[in-house]
Image: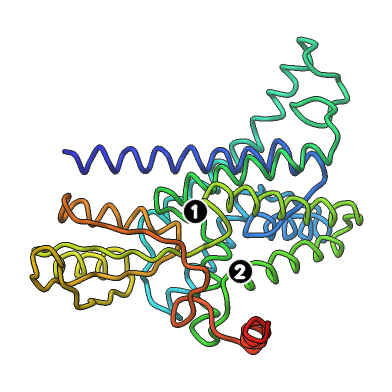
Amino acid sequence: MKSVFSAIKEYSLMTIGILFYTFAWIACVIPANGTGGGATGLSLVLCALIRNLTGFDIPVGTMAFAVNGILLLAAGFVIGWKFGLKTIFCVVMLSISLNFFQAELPAIKEWLTVRGLIAPDAISIFGNLEPILLVIMGGLLSGVGIYICFMQGGSTGGVDILALIINKYHPINYGRVVIVHDATVILASLLVGNGPETVIYGFLLTIVFSVTTDALLSGNQQSNQLLIISPRFHERIAEEITQQAHRGVTLLNGMGWYTKEPSQVVMVICRKRETQDVLKIVKNVDPGAFVSVTSATGVYGQGFGMIDGGMLNGMQKQDKK
């Protein structure tokens, strides 16, 4: 029964996070003639392209579902069908809520106009707020929404899936994939008739969104190192983390100085958004386990970034100083 309530809580919070994210796009970003990265930004560009070529309007949520669906299928054939139910749930909810807000917000805007709460020529339900302020608000709200999803182990797909596909053939830092993808999508908006202000708003949205998400995730570090001490259940914890969280585990030989008894220390390195999943596994197996969580300033190897020449040069310069 406890696991059922826990699942209900997680999926409810993920739904709230998705609603924050999609409301930010439909109520703030799009009225400001802005754009952004990720699957949603790419969907906006594709919708505009189809509209220019055929005159047919495709709902943003429908296009986002198609984009994420294609990425999920491609990743399934390339790296295997390892996607959890939470990712699929978030992708579906993202599409549904985008279409919902796109259909209902005009009616809400009209209702506010009739009652004199906003001007008839208002660009959004927030009235004639400056576009740049709408974009900043959109970045803040979408950052909060994604943070809520991450804390429950959810993912909206998009760049996360693309990064998995790329890493199959060429190890590359996740942040680099995000930067290149988002910049390409934002600049591509120029090809569908948007002006330079859209590009500026797009980069501003990306910056505000990233800063908000990073701040909520306790800083710029994207990885955590967990040391778990459980004398009786270390093997089961290691197995559960491997099977459920899909993260590598290393057992370190240790000894309790007070008891002078040998023990095994379970070491796990994971993304910050995966930390809560690992902690839940440890709690379910051994509530009395001792756990230390620290931020990792740099994690390199399979599943993370790779050591490149620029990093080595930077380290050498630090040594010389």
Label 2 or label 1, whichever lies nearer to me, is 2
Q: Is mark 1 on a helix, strand or loop?
A: helix
Q: State the CA–CA distance, disc 2 to disc 1.
A: 21 Å
Residue 47 falls in image quadrant: bottom right
Rendering coords of residue 149 (x, y %): 47, 48
What is the tally of numbered marks visible in this picture?
A: 2
Residue 209 vertical placement versus 79 (above, below): above
Q: Earlier in the sequence, mark 2 or mark 1?
A: 1
Q: Which amino acid does label 2 sit on?
A: Gly
Mark 2 lies on a secondary structure that is helix
| Residue on which the image places disc 1 | 91
Q: Name the residue under label 2.
A: 175
In the image, 273 versus 114, the foreground residue is: 273
Direction from residue 125 to residue 166 in the image, left or right: left
Picture quarter containing residue 251?
A: bottom left
Question: Depth check: 170 or 235 in front?
Answer: 235
Q: Where is residue 112 in the image (x, y as percent from the top left)?
A: 74, 17
Q: Which mark is residue 137?
A: none
Where the N terminus falls, by quadrant?
A: top left
Whether 272 is drawn above or below 143: the answer is below
Q: What residue type is labelled 1?
A: Val
Q: Is residue 168 above or below residue 107?
A: below
Residue at the image position 86 percent from the left and 65 percent from the top: 191
Crowd band around label 1 with a 10 angstrom C-alpha radius: few (<14), some (14–19), many (20+): many
Q: Position of residue 71 (x, y in %)?
A: 53, 69
- Which residue is depicted at the point 81% across and 50% down? 201
Dot 2 crowding, Cα within 10 Å, few <14, some 14–19, many 20+: few
The answer to whether 167 is drawn above or below residue 66 in the figure is below
